Image: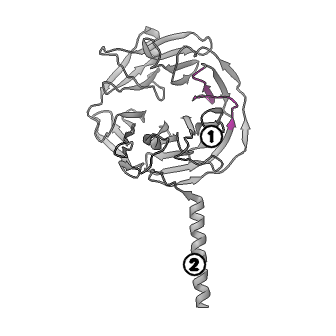
Amino acid sequence: PKKEKIIMRKTLLVAICLIVCIGCKTDKNYYIDQSYSYTNSVPINPKTPLESFDGGENYNAVDAQVYDSMCIYYTPLKAVRGFHSIMNLKTGEEIGCFGLKGNGPLESTNFYPINKMYTEGGMLKADFIDANKNRLFVWNISKSISDTRSVYDTIIPLDGLKNLPSPIGFYHRLNEDNFFVRTITRDNENAKQLTSPSHNIYSYSDLSLLRSYEIYTDSIIKYDYTGVWLPRRMTEAKYTANSKRQKVAMAMAYYPQINILDIASGDLQCFRIKELPEPSITKEIIYYSSIDCDDNFIYALYFELASDASTFTKTFIHIFDWDGKLIKNWELGKVYHDISVYDNKLYAFNLHSGEIDLYLVE
């Protein structure tokens, strides 16, 4: 009987270990300080666009955001006067070009794209970072359009920000008092190490550090392999945030993974869809290229790669709730590079052709 009990205990221990391993996994070259779990599966649902728009092919844009009938293109590569070009979706006509390029006091050689537009005092606004001069611009979009010039409510110097190991890569206005930032990754291939991104909340009033989040296993990540990846790609992700939910969502570029950070509790949850191909350091696979959200859902743009893993042939939208449950899996049947969600509508952009397609969010 004693021997049988020992055997039963060992069997039970093995079973528990198997359950844990199946439900919660990590990879060898996985540096997030939280293991991932597999979310539920849902049937693939082919979707066709409700409406299509033209007019963005001349911008050579790398990012696009929609508000009402306006599309704001981020155009750092285009030989136009500003970084932010606004187009009327219905007519295809340009409304204006703002965020001027240059070295003047209200200009920059490296304005970042906007994240989320918001209304304040009846005015449509958006914030963006001047990476060259380390400043935050509060852009009054409504007044800029009416005055046909770039109008800024305020410009905040960011030199006083502490705990920043590298420049800011993502910014989100949480409320009128505080903001969230994520820094970029810096790598040193010769030393086989990289500086991982930091995630912090700061106060607008005095730029004091209010909270930091430990997302990665260490501030300096060491690695021991040489492959087709650039080392910093281990941490590359697209970000979106929802102030009402007090959460930040991340779609990883080189892992088939969505991360959700609760900025109130500090909890981080990581999710993968089991059917997606596993990452490999010997074959570069791009998974997610864009992400957006609303109060109810997270929308992540996923690539389906060709068999040689060098080109992609169509794209999917993975829709999650804020608890990481996969709600829908749309097959779009076209190639897109970016998405923007506004008023229960999802706009998908092919930034090469300029094509914009509208999909209804049921």
Residue type at mark 1?
Answer: Ile
Q: Residue at x 57, y 45 (%)?
A: 256
Measured in 3D between alpha carbons, the distance from the residue under mark 1 to the one under mark 2, in whole angstroms, is 41 Å
Say above or below: 198 vs 133: below
The residue segment tinted magenta is: 330-352
N-terminal of the pair, mark 1 or mark 2, is: 2
Quarter holding the C terminus is top right
Residue 297 percent across, percent down from the top left: 59, 39
Q: Secondary structure at mark 1?
A: strand
Q: Which residue is mark 2?
A: 10
Residues tagged 1 and 2 counted as in contact (Cβ below 8 A): no
Looking at the image, can residue 240 be seen?
A: no
Quarter holding the N terminus is bottom right
**124 within the magenta span:** no
Q: Which mark is residue 42?
A: none
User: Residue extending furthest bottom?
Assistant: 1
Q: Secondary structure at mark 2?
A: helix
Q: Give whichever of 17, 223 is nearer the camera.
A: 223
The image quarter containing residue 156 is top left
Q: Which mark is residue 319?
A: 1
Say above or below: 353 vs 239: above
Q: Is residue 201 left or right of residue 308?
A: left
Q: How is the image coloured?
A: one colour
The image quarter containing residue 19 is bottom right
Residue type at mark 2?
Answer: Lys
